[in-house]
Structure formats: C-alpha cells, structure tokens
Image (cartoon, rainbow, N blue to C red):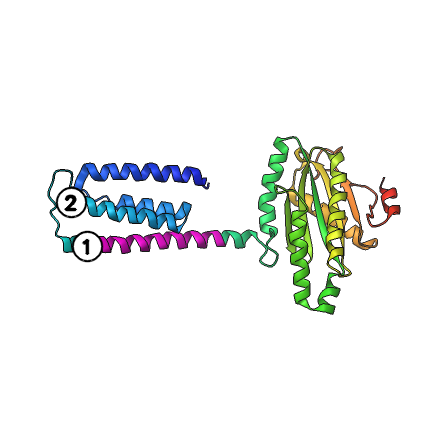
Amino acid sequence: MRLSRSRAWALLGAGLVATIVIDHVTGPQVNVVILYLGLACFGSWCLGERVGLGIGAVSVVMLGHINGFGAPGQVAAIKPVALAWNMIGRSLSMTVMVALASGLRHSLDHARWSATTDPLTGVLNKAGFNRRLRALISHAQRRQESVVLAYVDLDGFKGVNDGFGHAAGDTLLCDFAEKGADAIRAHDLFARIGGDEFVTLMTVPNCGQGDVAAEALHYRLSRILRDTGYAVTCSMGAMVVEANKIASTNRLIEAADGLMYEVKKSGKNALRVARLDLQPTITELPARPMPDRRLATQEGMADAA
C-alpha cells in the first residue's frame, strides 16, 4: 500500500523532529546516524530524491553540531580536521544511500509500468486490464451498478500497414488509443490487448443505460478513426450485465469477443450488444443477442430502435 504524499510528509517531519531530540539528549556518546540515514532513504523513496538529499544535508549538519560542539554546556572533544573528515564521509554515505533508494524506486515503478502498460500506445495492456478489471467490477458490485464490456477490432488496419508502412500503422494505433481513452470517463478502463484489438469496461447505473453507453462509445471510436483519414472502421461487441451477476471475468470477455466476431462475419463496421440483466449468471446461460446497430446509417439506427 502506497502512502499519500501528505501522510509521507507528516511521518517524515515527525521522525525528523524525534531524531533531532534524541540526538540532542544523548549527545556525542550515542551515534544516531542510522536514524538519519533511514529518514533520508524514506524521504527519497516516498517523496523523491531531492527530499532525501535535503534530509541527508540536515542530518550531516546536526551530526556535526552534536559531535563537534557537544551537548549544551560541554566542550567539543573532536578536533576540527577530524570533524571535517567525518562530515565529508557522512555526506558521501547519505548521498550514496539516497541515490540507491531513489534508483530502486524508479526501477520498481518502471517495472510496474511495463507490466501493466502497452509500450506502443501507453494505455493498459492485457495484464493491466485484467488487474484493474476485477477492482472496477467489485466497486460496481458494491454500488449495485451494471457494467459494459466492449471488445473492439479495427477493420482495414492491415491495409494501412501494407499500403502506408508500419510507421503509419503505429501512429494510427497510438492516436486511436489516446483519443479512445479520452472518450470514456477517467475511472473506466481502456486497453490494447494485442495487435489492433482493444477492450474497454464502463460502469453504468443500470443495464438499460448500458445499451446507450455502448452505442455512444462505438460512435465516438468510429469518429476517431474517420478523422485519421484512413479507410479504417471498427467492429465492436458489447456485453451489458449487472455487476452482481458476473461469475467469471474471463467468460465475460470471451462473450464480448464472440459478439465482435459475429459483427466481423456479418459485414464489419457495426455494433452488436447482448444483455444479461434477466439471467442468473453469465456462466449458466448463453447471452441473449440484440440486433446489430449500425451507427453509420439512419436505417441502422431505426433497426436498432
């Protein structure tokens, strides 16, 4: 569990005050450098390298003051040359430890980012989506909400790679991913799970509004693709289900994937929605498909209504 910055600052401030008090009370007889070192590493880990170096500088000054001048009313027992040598050694030690703590934190953050983020587009990858999926569904279950899981495949993307080069294809994927993620709310999920396939999860108050949300998403994604200037559209299958009736997230994704392939077989560039709001669980009964909704034509909208 990560500490908030405000809590980290509070703990760091309290620890520094306590350490300075202990240092003054015990005087040069007790070396508390380990406490200062721990605070510097804590500050670097939670708040950044600059904070860690700042704590290290304070630590060096305090240690030099206590060891060089003694406790109040006492005479210093360490010669100036030795005092300077000790302060240089402590400064170097603090700097090295802070750099190590900061480097380890950056490496850990990068490893976490790489494990959950698609390196090309910057959106969630399959592993990151699956991890966040369970948390969002649990949140929706507590709020008695429904979810919309949409599986999206780009129609004609291979033609972009073949006709304009892979660099153009990568640019299209990045543009689609960035704007697709912006087309949903911040707490909803948008991920690239491989090639030109994407998946999104949205929460809605009820299944009735899930149909509307799926249609709106398909319209927005289609408009994003149209604005690229390439002959690329999207086929989308969407499952709308009450969150409390989800028994298996894998089956939910498979069902949405199956709907998307039905769209691909029937002409592409369309949306097919299935609802599970009247069924016990997604694993016991098959989905009840609804008619295709082709948002690009007025006729398709009429059929969907």
Secondary structure beneath label 1:
helix
Q: Measured from the top left, where is residue 234 in percent x and y? A: 75, 53
Magenta: main secondary structure: helix
Asked which quadrant contains residue 244, the reply is top right
Question: What residue range appears in magenta?
Answer: 85-110
* Residue for point 71% across, 49% down: 151
Q: Which mark is residue 69?
A: 2
* Residue occupying image coordinates x 84% and y 43%: 291
Under tag 2, what secondary structure?
helix
Judge whether residue 118 can be spotted in this image.
Answer: yes
Q: Which residue shows up at 37% across the image and 51% down it?
A: 101
Q: Tag 1 or tag 2, which sits nearer the N-term?
A: 2
- The C terminus is located in which quarter? top right
Q: Is residue 173 above or below residue 209?
A: below
Residue 104 falls inside the magenta stretch: yes
> How many marks do you count on the picture?
2
Q: Return the residue nearer the eye: 96 or 256.
A: 96
> Taking 243 as reference, is 50 above or below it?
below
Q: What label does residue 84 carry, if any?
A: 1
Relative vertical location of residue 161 with respect to residue 240 in this rendering, above or below: below
Question: x, y percentage for residue 248?
Answer: 65, 41
Residue 88 point in image, percent of width and height? 23, 56
| Residue type for callout 2 | Phe
